Structures are given as C-alpha cells and as structure tokens.
Amino acid sequence: MSQPVAIKRLSHGADLPLPRYESDLAAGMDLLAAIDQPIELLPGDRQIVPTGIAIALPAGFEAQVRPRSGLAAKKGISVLNAPGTIDADYRGEVGVILINLGSETVTLNRGDRIAQMVIAPVVQAAWVEVDDLPATERGAGGFGSTGTGGS
C-alpha cells in the first residue's frame, strides 16, 4: 500500500536523489546529507544535518526519523531524539539531529545516507478523565516489572 506524499527539493539538495525504499518490503527510506562541506562529528558532538527536502504529509500521518542501523553499529552515529517526529502540518526542511556516540571522529560528506524516514499513521487521543483506571494483572508495575520471573 502506498500513500502519496508531496515532497519539495530545496535548492541546496536539488542534485541529490529523493528518499526511496531500497527493497520491496523496506519500511524506511534513507535521508541524505545535503551539505556543501564535510562535517566532522567528534565523539559526543551533535549537529542538525540538512536533507535538502521539505514534505507535506497528509492529515493522520507522521514521518519518523530514525538511526540507520549500519551507521549506528559501525560508527556510533545515532539520531539524538530518535525517533524524531515530523508532524503533518510542518512545511520546513527535514533536518536530522545526529550524535556521535562512538569513540572516533566521523566525517559526513554530501549525499551520505544519514538516517531513515518511516511514514506512519497517527491517532490523536481524546482524553477521558476518570477517577479510577481499569484493573490489569500488571497494575502499576513499572520499569522492568514484567521481566523479573523465570529466565
């Protein structure tokens, strides 16, 4: 199933390919660095990297910006606010907040695949305030409470 999404190439990304699925069943599309000069990310550094595109999502959808697993595993590069959310009413440039969690400086070049973007449906909640919540077996058990038994 495909969903039409309007996309605009910005002038500094005009020569870069549009995001695309790299396999038939891929969930995410690669986002590319639309930079004129290489960026060096020192260990612990973070920077917003432009992609050279703006999008207009239909109502009821969001775009999630996620780390690329290979970049994370090999170089320690992640998306700082993973997953970043692009709302349906945002019309500015898609930027990716990258962080170097590795131990070595990483150089990013123009056209490098820096993150992936997943288009997903969104449901907006309509809060219903109540005095008590329905009971469950778990109850108020928090962090790690479901993984304490057995193995």
Image (cartoon, helix red, strand yellow):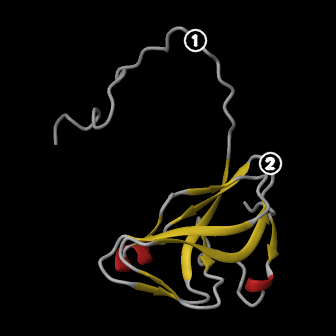
| Residue 68 disc label | none
Q: Which residue is mark 2?
A: 59
Horizontal side, residue 1 vs residue 71: left or right: right
Q: Position of residue 132 (x, y in %)?
A: 50, 10
Quadrant assignment, res 85: bottom right
Disc 1 and disc 2 in contact, CB within 8 angstroms: no
Q: Hey, which residue is sitting farthest top in the picture?
A: 131
Q: Position of residue 15 (x, y in %)?
A: 75, 91
Amino acid type of the residue tagged 2 in the rendering: Ala
Identify the residue shown where x is 63% and y is 85%. 35
Mark positioned earlier in the residue sequence (1 or 2): 2
Q: Hey, which residue is sitting farthest left in the picture?
A: 151
Q: Position of residue 30 (x, y in %)?
A: 60, 75
Amino acid type of the residue tagged 1 in the rendering: Val
Q: Is residue 118 above or below residue 102?
A: above
Horizontal side, residue 16 vs residue 108: left or right: right
Q: Could you tell me which quadrant the N terminus lies in?
A: bottom right
Report, in whole angstroms, how far the alpha carbon at label 1 lies from the one at label 2.
Answer: 29 Å
Horizontal side, residue 91 vs residue 29: left or right: right
Identify the residue shown where x is 29% and y is 34%. 146
Q: Residues within 10 Å of mark 2 (few under 14, many from 20)?
A: few
Identify the residue shown where x is 76% and y is 56%. 90
Q: Position of residue 12 (x, y in %)?
A: 75, 85
Of 146 and 89, which appears nearest the observer? 89
Identify the residue shown where x is 46% and y is 87%. 107
What element does badge 1 sit on?
Answer: loop
Of 68 and 3, which appears nearest the observer? 68
Horizontal side, residue 61 vs residue 118: left or right: right
Q: Which residue is mark 1?
A: 130
